[in-house]
Amino acid sequence: MDKINQIITLLENGNHEEALRSYRKILTNGSHEERFVLGEELFQLGFIEEAKALFERLLESYPDEGELLVLLAEAHIDLGQEDEAILVLERLNEEDPSYPQSLLLLADLYQMEGLYEVSEQKLMKAKSILQNEVIIDFALGELYAEQGKFLEATKAYEKVLLTEDVIAGVNVNQRMAEVLSVGGAFEEALPYYEKALNEKIEINTLFSYGFTALQAGFNRTAIEKFNELKELDPEYHSLYLYLSKAYEREEELQNSFNAINTGIEYDEFNKELFFHGGKLALKLNKEEDAENLFREALALDPEYTEAASTLTKLFLHQERYEDVLEITDLFNDFEEEEPQLLWDAAISYHQLEEYSLALNKYTTAYTYLKEQSDFLSDYGNFLIEEGKMSEAAEIFSKLVKMEPDSIEYQDILQRLSE
């Protein structure tokens, strides 16, 4: 095997041309053993085309050798030649020792093509041959998880975890945790995240642990895990919004606000950070900070209606009606009108004594908000002020039907009727 060792050494030292000359000699005149060993070595080093040629040459002498067929198929797969790989694998005889491995490869290929039923059939066939092979249970778990069959996936992973925590380089506890979390079993997922992190600290797993803990209502655990992640990788942008939400749920508003500000330092183009920061600033009675943060969110996304409507509510509270209109005017040319902004504009025009413009906004908003009692009450009172008694009566008649126990609405309707 000295020739092969020389080729590998040449390749590792970057002497590709000399290595290629020696490779061609073995491809043409080498022994079967030399071709096989060199093919495996080249495959591991990433010289797939060269390895493939060696396997094809060997198959000329051993056309039914299952191990060679599997190696050739793997080479086709690495080269993106999935159809050729399937044709090669289908050549294996069921009695061949490599047949179960061919079934696993076929299952992967059919899964890649979205042919899940065929993939499952191949795996179940392999399972019938090697009943205690956990790699097959793992492959079934991966298949079911991709399909969204979370119950079946957890059962498959449970079988793997009876004997293995890591398989094919994959942390199975992490996989189990992810499947449980995506399936909505948040609390059940947490112990598996813990086991996965005991096996290996990995930042994406740590984030998923914190996020799942937050969804399960374990806010202190979420805070702990997000802070651990922040220590490991402060530039992991996604953590800050959820760390802030966890603090907020624990009513630690200043810590929540600080988390948002830190997040903005690392991710200045995340509109959600600015918006959530604005809402926290309002809770902390920092109205100026809130305004600035909402404006930043709108600068990042001029169609961010939730930020716009929250900002206009702040301006209405501050009686800054012209500022309300500054914001609502930004949405005038949009195809879909935002009902809340129409209502806020109507209130502002009313307060600025622009009554015809106010009526126009109220009328348009009514199209969207005709089932919302707060809007109808405001609209009805505006119509009364404008002397439009019959139109107001229609509105309050609707309100009485919606809220038959309201004495206030009944009294107003009675007065309008008189």
Image (tube, helix red, strand yellow):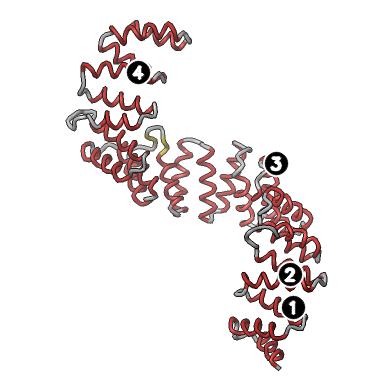
The kind of residue tagged 3 is Glu
Of callouts 2 and 4, the N-terminal one: 4
Q: Marks 2 and 1: CB-CB under 8 Å?
A: yes
Q: Which mark is residue 346?
A: 2
Q: Is residue 315 left or right of residue 91?
A: right
Of callouts 1 and 3, the N-terminal one: 3
Viewer-nearest of discs 1 and 4:
1
Give above or below for 258 relative to 336: above
The kind of residue tagged 2 is Ala
Q: Residues within 10 Å of mark 1 (few under 14, many from 20)?
A: many
Of callouts 3 and 2, the N-terminal one: 3
Kindly report the distance in space between the C-alpha atoms of the residues bearing marks 1 and 4.
82 Å
The residue at the point 31 percent across, 27 percent down is 73
Of callouts 1 and 4, the N-terminal one: 4
The kind of residue tagged 4 is Ala
Viewer-nearest of discs 3 and 4:
4
The residue at the point 33 percent across, 44 percent down is 116
Q: Which of the 4 image quadrants contains residue 129?
A: top left
**SS state under label 4:** helix
Kindly report the distance in space between the C-alpha atoms of the residues bearing marks 3 and 4.
50 Å
